[in-house]
Image: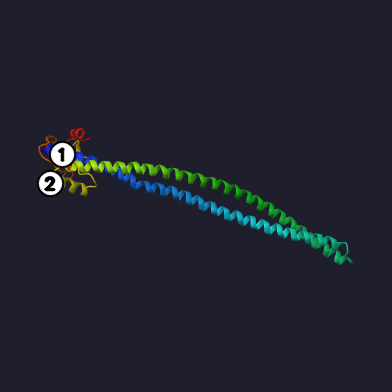
Amino acid sequence: MVKETIEQFTRLQYFDTKIYEAEKLLAAIPEMLKERCIEYETLLEEKKSLDVSYNEVRSEIQKTEAENSDHKILLAGAQKKLTSVHNNREYEAALKELDNLKKSISDSDNKTRNLNEKAEMLMNAVTEKTEMCSQSENIYIKEKKEKEEENKGLFEEVAILKKERDAFAATVKKSILSKYERVRSARNNLAITPVNNETCSGCNMKIPPQLAVDVKKEKELFQCPYCQRFLYNPKIEAKAS
């Protein structure tokens, strides 16, 4: 009777462990996809930030070029005015205006050149980040599809295991099944565990030597004095699986 009960417990534990592992994988899948989604969204935000910086630089270039164009018009006017001055004072003033305008044009040219270099660097960064976004999105879509397929397989596996488990549980006496379920609920899905080297494999505590001997005799159903899990001789495992 004791051997039969232990075999029933180990068989139930086999099903419950398989179901627990499959459901744990199912629970982990959304988290994995969430990480991929966060990675993609982060890259997308970085790209948007680069786009804003690039557009700001382009706007600054247009503004600088417009100012430069105005300066060149003023320079042409100042050069024309230089030919119609009437005295040295007017001539010196015209020359000073020309020098200032030439300097402004030169500064604008340098500024435009630097801004164009910056714009090119930003454009390259935008292109690179766009490619990274595309790759990240493709990976996310691919993994989402794979996980959905994996989900489907796991759901089917859990459904089959539960059906088999229920069918087997129906053959176990209610009083015996109740004991098993009570311990399993209290001990993180693990109700029965083997004794190895006088140690409970459930809580890894050393049990009394005499208890280890009694467990091997299989004449009575014993529980770990520390975690209350049912104990059994490992040789029974082959029959349970």
Cα separation between marks 1 and 2: 14 Å
Front one among 44 and 228: 44
Q: What element carries label 1?
A: helix
Above or below 129: residue 75: below
> CB under 8 Å between callouts 1 and 2?
no
Residue 116 shown left or right of residue 89 in the figure: left
Mark 2 Cα shell of 10 Å, populated few (<14), some (14-19), many (≥20): few
Front one among 133 and 89: 133
Front one among 177 and 202: 177
Q: How is the model colour-coded?
A: rainbow
Task: Return the residue at label 2.
Answer: 175
Query: What percent of the width, then of the height, locates residue 118?
Result: 63, 51
For the C terminus, the image quarter is top left
Q: Residue 96 appears in which quarter of the rendering? A: bottom right
Query: What percent of the width, then of the height, locates residue 172?
Result: 15, 42
For the N terminus, the image quarter is top left
**Residue 116: image tag:** none
Q: Is mark 2 on a helix, strand or loop?
A: helix
Query: What percent of the width, then of the height, locates residue 71?
Result: 76, 60
Residue 107 shown left or right of residue 12 in the figure: right
- The residue located at (50%, 44%) in the rendering is 135
Residue type beneath disc 1: Ile
Residue type beneath disc 2: Ser
Above or below 237: residue 143: below
- The residue located at (71%, 59%) in the rendering is 66
Dot placed on the residue nearer the N-terminal end, 1 or 2: 1
Task: Return the residue at label 1.
Answer: 6
Residue 218 shown left or right of residue 24 in the figure: left
**Front of the two marks 1 and 2:** 2
Query: What percent of the width, then of the height, locates residue 21?
Result: 29, 43
Mark 1 Cα shell of 10 Å, populated few (<14), some (14-19), many (≥20): many
The residue sitting at the right extreme is: 86
